[in-house]
Image (cartoon, helix red, strand yellow):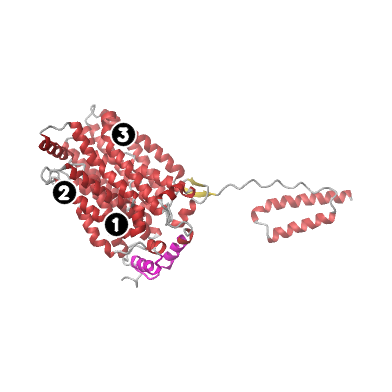
């Protein structure tokens, strides 16, 4: 299609072609779906509470207690993450059986079903349909979080992989912002229009079904998993807009040769593999550092958080929209930084900034009743909390988990990481309302402690993956230890056993002829075979021979 030129966009960075941009756009629609359904439940919570109460009263003629009503709403919020867990853990199986692109396409059928269930729940006068729809759309989003980062990382050139990987988070933030804007009362957040708010989720799925079939499958999947070199070359030529793709193919073959003994690993094999334990641990902790930092408490309950700090309901809605705008802007800012500053550095800055912001959120909640201006301090602190999340923990865990593993274990490792991510997501969505009741103004304090733990782990254990091929990253973990020094990563090889003790000096009765012969032998070894690093040992032995020879001459 574009095989005659080296780039489809004359002003684009090297490797960023029109075909690649279109494939990325089509894939990232899945993350827009994820972001939209994460935030869509936030603004209309009071409307949904009234709906649940009315449905129960129409069935039983009884008034539902506030606690039971809140529990049903919490289930509707958090069951989204249950579906995400199931979708995430099946990501590796789907990726290997149907391919990265093929799996994303099939996934959209579930997305359409979930959107339809939610949209018609009011017409059917059933909050159970809303819950089932949230479960189905959660499965769709969980599978997307496994497949989309994998697809993007495998179609992107090495020099652009960091920035393009950030587009995962950009899609999520755009979806979040869209849900926040549409959810206000002036648009779709009303008693009559809220079903349309949930029905909008069918649009990203429909667009992906329309656009993605035009895009090529992952060349790595075609070459390494399917052994279809011609198809892999053709896919690369479409993505790079050039026939000169031999370097990319050679990199994939190198990865394939390194993984010949590994093949496609299952989840259990990845967990049991000693060589993969450290990258798996890093991937899991990185996912936890995204979810257990309090960001989903902001996404799910920011409106309630702002009203509890003293803002009116209307102002709280617009402050929530401000959270979405900040997320989009800062994600755009982080795209060029990803391949300049590096993943590890940005993640450290993000976690550190969130740690400080969470302290200010707690202070603002504690003293908001004393001064009126402190109310706005809580809003500013929350916005900065979101800013630092977008810089680091928002996008890097998805990206770095795909980068830490070579082709063989990557699908299974992504499934494990996504399962952990969604489990933590579910935990926060279900527990945070109870945390607010129990801890009141100290509800963000547990997140502050966890942020400090995650920052320490990242500083000590997470390697920098910027501008490294998948094979180079995998090679970091084939040794005993990965060490960070001022942001640089190095591999410490296994410690060698101590060298054998030096032989005792030759006896004094040794003949002068043998001493001279040993000296000549040492000289020859140094000139022809002895490595440079052993020069000092050679000098010591030579001096010993000279002293011994002189001593023998004196005695003779």
Mark 2 neighbour density, 10 Å: few (under 14) some (14–19) many (20 or more): many
Does dot 3 land on a helix, a strand or a loop? loop
Tell me the magenta residue range. 227-255
Picture coordinates of residue 544, whole percent (x, y):
77, 49
Residue under the point 10% across and 34% down: 61
Examine the rendering and report whether any part of residue 104 can be seen: yes
Q: To which residue does mark 2 refer?
A: 119
The first of marks 3 and 2 along the sequence is: 2
Q: CA distance from mark 3 to mark 2?
A: 34 Å
The first of marks 1 and 2 along the sequence is: 1
SS majority, magenta: helix
Q: Nearer the viewer, mark 3 or mark 1?
A: 1
Q: To which residue does mark 3 refer?
A: 444
Q: Quadrant of the N terminus?
A: bottom left
Quadrant in the picture for residue 151: bottom left
Picture coordinates of residue 157, whole percent (x, y):
38, 60
Name the one closer to the observer, 97 or 421: 97
Residue under the point 79% across and 51% down: 546
Q: Does 248 appear in magenta?
A: yes
Q: To which residue does mark 1 refer?
A: 104
Does dot 1 land on a helix, a strand or a loop? helix
Mark 3 neighbour density, 10 Å: few (under 14) some (14–19) many (20 or more): many
Picture coordinates of residue 220, whole percent (x, y):
39, 61
Q: CA distance from mark 1 to mark 2?
A: 23 Å
């Amino acid at each position: 299609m574009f095989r005659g030129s080296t780039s489809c966009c004359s002003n684009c960075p090297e490797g960023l072609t029109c075909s690649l941009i279109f494939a990325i756009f089509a894939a990232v629609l899945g993350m827009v779906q994820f972001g939209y359904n994460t935030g869509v439940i936030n603004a209309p919570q009071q409307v949904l509470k009234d709906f649940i109460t009315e449905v129960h009263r129409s069935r039983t003629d009884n008034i539902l207690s506030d606690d039971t009503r809140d529990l049903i709403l919490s289930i509707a919020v958090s069951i989204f993450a249950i579906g995400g867990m199931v979708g995430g853990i099946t990501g590796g199986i789907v990726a290997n059986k149907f391919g990265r692109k093929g799996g994303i396409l099939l996934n959209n059928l579930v997305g359409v079903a979930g959107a339809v269930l939610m949209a018609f729940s009011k017409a059917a006068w059933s909050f159970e349909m809303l819950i089932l729809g949230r479960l189905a759309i959660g499965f769709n989003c969980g599978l997307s979080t496994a497949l989309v980062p994998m697809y993007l990382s495998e179609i992107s050139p090495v020099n652009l992989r960091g920035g393009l990987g950030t587009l995962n988070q950009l899609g999520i933030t755009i979806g979040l912002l869209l849900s926040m804007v549409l959810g206000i009362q002036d648009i779709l957040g009303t008693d009559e229009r809220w079903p349309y708010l949930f029905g909008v989720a069918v649009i990203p799925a429909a667009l992906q079904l329309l656009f993605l079939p035009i895009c090529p499958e992952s060349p790595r999947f075609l070459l390494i998993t399917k052994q279809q070199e011609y198809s892999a070359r053709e896919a690369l030529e479409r993505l790079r807009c050039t026939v000169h793709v031999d370097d990319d193919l050679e990199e994939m073959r190198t990865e394939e040769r390194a993984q010949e003994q590994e093949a496609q690993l299952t989840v259990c094999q990845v967990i049991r593999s000693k060589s993969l334990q450290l990258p798996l641990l890093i991937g899991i902790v990185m996912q936890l550092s995204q979810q257990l930092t309090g960001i989903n408490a902001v996404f799910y309950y920011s409106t309630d958080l702002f009203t509890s700090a003293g803002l009116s309901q209307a102002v709280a809605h617009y402050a929530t929209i401000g959270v979405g705008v900040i997320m989009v802007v800062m994600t755009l800012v982080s795209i060029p930084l990803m391949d300049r500053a590096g993943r590890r550095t940005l993640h450290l800055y993000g976690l550190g900034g969130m740690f400080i912001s969470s302290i200010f959120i707690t202070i603002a909640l504690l003293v908001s009743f004393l001064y009126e201006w402190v109310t706005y301090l809580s809003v500013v602190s929350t916005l900065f909390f979101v800013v630092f999340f977008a810089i680091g923990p928002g996008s890097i865990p998805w990206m770095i988990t795909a980068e830490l593993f070579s082709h063989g274990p990557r699908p299974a490792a992504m499934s494990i990481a996504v399962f952990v991510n969604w489990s933590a997501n579910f935990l926060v969505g279900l527990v945070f309302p109870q945390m607010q009741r129990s801890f009141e103004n100290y509800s963000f304090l547990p997140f502050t402690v966890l942020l400090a733990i995650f920052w320490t782990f990242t500083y000590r254990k997470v390697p920098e993956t910027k501008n490294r091929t998948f094979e180079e990253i995998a090679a970091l973990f084939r040794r005993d230890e990965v060490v960070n020094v001022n942001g640089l990563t190095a591999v410490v090889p296994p410690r060698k056993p101590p060298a054998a003790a030096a032989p005792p000096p030759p006896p004094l009765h040794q003949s002068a002829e043998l001493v001279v012969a040993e000296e000549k032998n040492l000289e020859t070894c140094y000139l022809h075979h002895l490595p440079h690093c052993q020069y000092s040992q050679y000098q010591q032995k030579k001096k010993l021979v000279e002293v011994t020879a002189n001593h023998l001459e004196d005695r003779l």
